[in-house]
Amino acid sequence: MASGVELGRIETDIPARMDRLPWARWHWLVVIGLGTVWILDGLEVTIVGSMSDALKSTDTGLGLSSSQIGLAGAVYVAGACVGALFFGQLTDRFGRKKLFLVTLGVYIFATVLTAFSMNPMWYFAARFLTGAGIGGEYAAINSAIDELIPAQYRGRVDVVINGSFWIGAAGGALLTIPLLDPTVIDAEWGWRLAFGLGAILGVGVLLVRRHVPESPRWLFIHGREDEGERIVAQIEDGITREKGPLAEVSDTITIRQRKTIGIALIAKTVFTMYPRRTVLCFALFVGQAFLYNAFYFTYGDTLSTFFGVEQTGYYIAIFAASNFIGALALSPLFDTVGRVRMIAGTYILSGVLLAVVGFFLGSVTAVTLTLFGAIIFFFASAGASSAYLTASEVFPMETRALCIAFFYAIGTAVGGITGPLLFGVLIENASGSGDITGIAPGYFLGGALMVIAGVVEIFLGVKAEGQSLESIARPLTADDDAPAPA
């Protein structure tokens, strides 16, 4: 894709007008319409984790082994990586709204395919496509949310929305309890219905999402400033009726408009203009991806294999609730205490706690392991969510969606694919002896990656709280000679 031809130069106050808005009902529309994707992701991951035994059955399931359960998790994440990169560049090129509608459609279609799986290969292929839809959602949604939410609320909103994954996780865990109870629903249909219900929820989200507008910031850069002005004026009119007169703004930015931004320019921006931020995002994504995908994708299998738990849904629901409560409780601190302190603190603390639990695995029960996990991930949840926040706000607007996709894909490929595969193998190797300490190396590695990422944040983190996106990272099309931050 070549760099787009320059369309003209405009001076606009849209960023300042969007950032000075008070919180209003319109912002809740954005949160509900866009943020619910993480609920769907949580539902997907949890259903798979909770129904490992159902999928292993050769009579009513697909005859999967523990290593294949781990492989299914890795395939899902691989699809998410590919989808993020593919749809991420399309999001920067064709707009946020078109892509967050398309990617949700891909998710719904693939989830229905999963429900009709006839054999392991079909199941793996459907999981790959489902992951591709979710990966594309991450790029399209995070970029849209940050461009529509005022600067003073951006940190807490991002952390809570990304943390809402655990609402879906808790719902999915509880949902699988009756669906996997053969006295309630035939075992052959229960796990299929679980996937089908995820598709139904996706259709509901799609109906709400239609009312979320295109990002005005994306519009004015791509030569559609009149449309951007109309959207901002409509938002301001609605908030004025609800909240009263709005403050005047004087800050403007001059933009050299382009139809498209070339991949070469985006790559140059990430690797040469912002090398410190590139290292930072890579460390944050690898740490959280390994921790979550390794531990959570195989958690249900761990409970059933080593502790004989038949209904893992209750345990996973408690674990998931702690994750969301942590993101909700800690999120305001990312805007007040600050990004660097909170990100470094949550990463290092959760990493240290996970490693400590690894030393005591031989003496845990299903209940105490869940309790330890709830405490660790109370902090880890907010930290993991902040990785998406960081990648979304520290690079120029023209590259935002693709940067999110890039770091999600690379970090998740390193941590998110290897994690489930490693844990799947560790569980299978240790299952013969029934000794859970065989999976301790996975805990130690996950803890180490989180601590390393926290230390990187201390030295390379960006103090982005309360700042406009344009001041954190100057747009590539900005018509000024101010030096870009490292």
Image: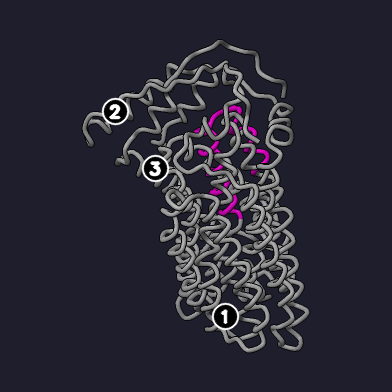
Quarter containing the C terminus: top right
Element under label 2? loop
Question: What are the residue bounds of the magenta stretch?
Answer: 84-113
Residue 211, percent from left and from top: 38, 36
Quote the CA–CA distance across marks 3 and 2: 30 Å
Residue lying at 29% horizontally and 28% vertically, measured from the top left: 247
Q: Nearer the viewer, mark 1 or mark 2?
A: 2
Quote the CA–CA distance across marks 1 and 3: 38 Å
Q: How is the image coloured?
A: one colour
> In the image shown, does 338 or 200 lie closer to the viewer?
338
Query: Disc 2 marks which residue?
Result: 247
Callout 2 environment at 10 Å: few (<14), some (14 to 19), or many (20+)? few
Asked whether 107 falls inside the magenta stretch, the response is yes
Q: Nearer the viewer, mark 1 or mark 3?
A: 1
Q: Which mark is residue 208?
A: 3
Quote the CA–CA distance across marks 1 and 2: 52 Å
Tell me the amino acid under the disc marked 3. Answer: Val
Residue lying at 40% horizontally and 33% vertically, measured from the top left: 19
**Cβ–Cβ below 8 Å for labels 1 and 2?**
no
Residue 316, percent from left and from top: 52, 72
Q: Is residue 400 above or below residue 373?
A: above
Tell me the amino acid under the disc marked 2. Answer: Ala
**Cβ–Cβ below 8 Å for labels 1 and 3?**
no
Residue 341, percent from left and from top: 53, 55
Query: Disc 1 marks which residue?
Result: 369
